[in-house]
Image (cartoon, rainbow, N blue to C red):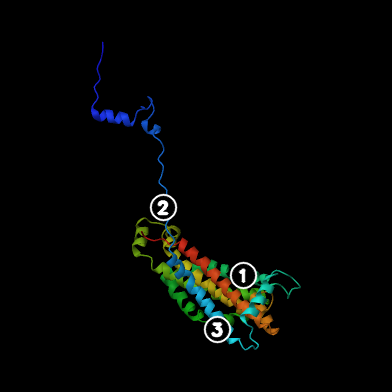
Amino acid sequence: MVSAVFHSPADGAAAAANPTPAPAGRPAAAMAPPRVRPARARRPIDWRAVALRVLPPVLGLALLIGIWALATLKGGSFPTPAATWDAAVQLFSDPFYRNGPNDQGIGWNILNSLSRVAMGFGLAALVGIPLGFVVGRFEFASRMVSPLVALLKPVSPLAWLPIGLLAFKSANPAAIWTIFICSIWPMVVNTAVGVQRVPEDYLNVARVLKLSEWRVITRILLPAVLPYVLTGVRLSVGTAWLVIVAAEMLTGGVGIGFWVWDEWNNLNVAHIIIAIFVIGIVGLLLEWALMALAKHFTFDGD
């Protein structure tokens, strides 16, 4: 018995396009060749944007050096840019030498200053950020702490140094204490402001769900307040680096501030200028690092 099978033209075209049928018991999709994603076209470099980003700071630095060179053209006690550069090359050729407790390379002085900043700033963060949450969350705490912050925040950093020397009887903890007391205020204020600006609807939902205070802080307040916290941290670390230089000038020891004062006593103005640039560069790097951290933890509502 012969059976005739008729195919439509559309079936014939489909068979011509797919001449090999899929084996029985195996899905046809498994036999399909893998899709090759088209390569993304590289975006052309926007040289104008690069120039606008690079040229202004380069021109500003060149203008500063040019004014400096003109001011020292006739000589005098102030070193020229070329003489300062030569002194910097010699200074950084061996930044970690040790010739005694009071004669160490600039690298050791920077590291010692950074270690004091890290300790004072870390203690300020451990106290200031939780205190800011409490002040922003509870009105009674806000009314109690806000006058103290308003009273103590404008006090000059160096006014706290004698208190540290009296309390700790040592220069190093006194410097750390000064950094702590001057770094804590921006973190308290910014964190409290961030907590107070959390939408009330979020807190109403937490009340409806009967969330504990710990869950309210960790699930609602912390994600919303994190940008404010990081802003306070960024302001605090700038204050800490500013204060440590002045504190070390008065307390002595190994540190970039004491090194500047020691070079002034030696009338080495070139090294003082180098220290000014080093202090500025280190502060700029700290600022950039915290700005990158803040950008990483800032969430947009897109």
Q: Which residue is mark 2?
A: 41
Q: Please say if 27 is above or below 149.
A: above
Query: Picture quarter containing residue 162?
Result: bottom right
Q: CA distance from mark 3 to mark 1?
A: 32 Å
**In this orientation, which residue lies closer to the viewer: 140 or 9?**
9
Q: Which residue is mark 1?
A: 114
Q: Residues within 10 Å of mark 1 (few under 14, many from 20)?
A: some
Name the image quarter holding the N terminus. top left
Label 1 element class: helix
- Residue at coordinates 41% horizontally, 52% vertically from top-left? 41
* Amino acid bearing label 1: Leu
Label 3 element class: helix
Query: Which label number is shown at residue 67?
Result: 3
- Residue at coordinates 59% horizontally, 68% vertically from top-left? 118
Query: Picture quarter containing residue 69?
Result: bottom right
89 relative position to 295: left or right: right
